[in-house]
Amino acid sequence: MAKQKTDPNYKVIAENRRARYDYAIEDDIECGIMLEGSEVKSLRAGGSNIAESYAAVEEGELWLVNSYIAPYEQAKSFKHEERQRRKLLVSRKELSNLWNATQRKGMTLVPLVLYFNHKGIAKLKIGIAKGKKTHDKRETQAKRDWSRQKQRLLKDHG
């Protein structure tokens, strides 16, 4: 991770911070995303949101549903739809693993981070997750609060 921060091409476009609160993420996978030219330009300008989106395996393909990419104003005739389904690119083996996780184990595919990798290519990190119940969320919040409080105490009385 430290190498990616210093890389000039690496850039986080959109992050789903609520995903780790709502879901227990068991594994994650990096996949490519099929985009039109105006979508890439818009992402470079920084206009996107993956907070309400999800991924689904349908008819042997992986799709990103309900993600938002802002319209690119300079695109005259080749404009894109803001909330269209976008195809995600993974290997056949990974696709079968994702299908097994969602269909047999009852897991959910949650987009975590949309970013440009070190080569400048748009990638999406998907988490294979299980939904948390309310008491699990409270437990996570309590652990987070305690760790913050512990850090403060160590800093003050260290």
Image (tube, rainbow, N blue to C red):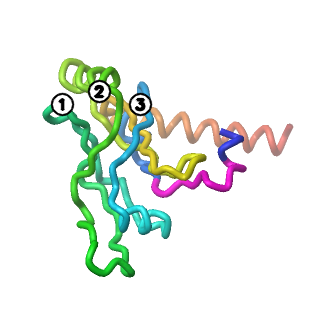
Decide which of tag 2 and tag 3 comes sooner along the chain. Answer: 3
Q: Nearer the viewer, mark 3 or mark 1?
A: 1
* Residue 6 is inside the magenta segment: yes
Above/below status of 48 relative to 135:
below
Q: Position of residue 92 (x, y in %)?
A: 30, 24
Q: Nearer the viewer, mark 2 or mark 3?
A: 2
Mark 3 burial class by Cα count in 10 Å: few <14, some 14-19, many 20+: many
- Distance, label 2 to label 1, CA atoms, is 8 Å
Give the extent of the magenta segment. Answer: 5-14
* Residue named by callout 3: 25
Which amino acid, mark 3? Ile
Above/below status of 64 relative to 106:
below
Q: Position of residue 140 (x, y in %)?
A: 47, 35
> Mark 2–mark 1 contact, CB under 8 Å?
yes
Mark 1 burial class by Cα count in 10 Å: few <14, some 14-19, many 20+: few
Quadrant in which the C terminus is drawn: top right
Which numbered disc covers residue 60?
1
Q: Position of residue 14 (x, y in %)?
A: 46, 56
Decide which of tag 2 and tag 1 comes sooner along the chain. Answer: 1
Q: Residue furthest left?
A: 59
Per the image, label 3 sits on a secondary structure element best described as: strand
Which amino acid, mark 2? Leu
Per the image, label 1 sits on a secondary structure element best described as: loop
Q: Residue at x 56, y 39 (%)?
A: 144
87 lies left or right of 123: left
In the image shown, does 20 or 152 lie closer to the viewer? 20
Res 154 → quadrant = top right
